[in-house]
Amino acid sequence: MTIEIGAKLPEATLLHMGDAGAETVNLSDKLKGRKVVIFGLPGAYTGTCSTAHVPSFIRTAGKFADKGVDEIICVSVNDPFVMKAWGEATGATAAGITMLADADASFSKAVGQTFDVPHLGFFARSKRYSLLAEDGVVTQFNPEVGPGCEISAGEHLLSQL
């Protein structure tokens, strides 16, 4: 099932690299009583993800905070080591964006946002999207319908607030 506006986000356990190594993150704990932006993308260090999608949220991070957003989370079907390194390499971590790994794609599958491109080695990767959740309920949802990063970009989601 594809997630939609008005739906509660599913329970999910994601991974984050902390000071002591890989740590589990219960997504519902991060969402409870908070306004959170989540954006999903196909993969760390991939073209559009690195040059357009993540930068769009770096550019808009302060404006989201001004609108009362408590946290911006980037989710990708990668491991937490890669997500940590990519967050540092792109400046996302310095901008305050939380980089979370959906290592087994369980969250991406639960929200109906996976796809495969076998010749690239992409299996159960996250489609490109952005959403706003308030207390775990989706209030905005922007699935990208074509190549590139237009509908799911930070600027577009910001314009909806």
Image (tube, rainbow, N blue to C red):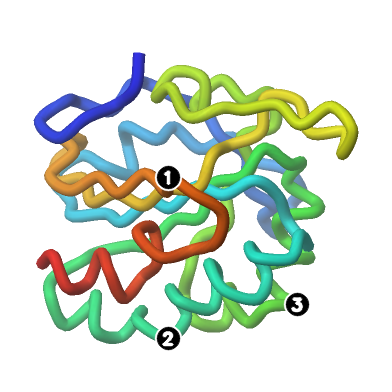
Q: Residue at x 44, y 56 (%)?
A: 73
Identify which amino acid the numbered label 3 is placed on: Ala
The residue where tag 1 is placed is 145
Q: Residues within 10 Å of mark 3 (few under 14, many from 20)?
A: few
The residue where tag 3 is placed is 89
Instruction: Name the spot of residue 135 as percent of width and height, x first.
Output: 14, 40
Q: Residue most toward the front?
A: 146
Mark with earlier residue (1, 3): 3
Q: Residue at x 54, y 78 (%)?
A: 55
Picture quadrant where residue 45 is located: bottom right
Mark with earlier residue (2, 3): 2
Mark with earlier residue (1, 2): 2
Instruction: Name the spot of residue 90 as percent of width and height, x first.
Output: 68, 78
Instruction: Name the spot of residue 156 as percent of width and height, x first.
Output: 27, 69
Q: Is residue 62 above or below residue 9?
A: below
Look at discs 2 and 3 and give the one toward the viewer.
Answer: 2
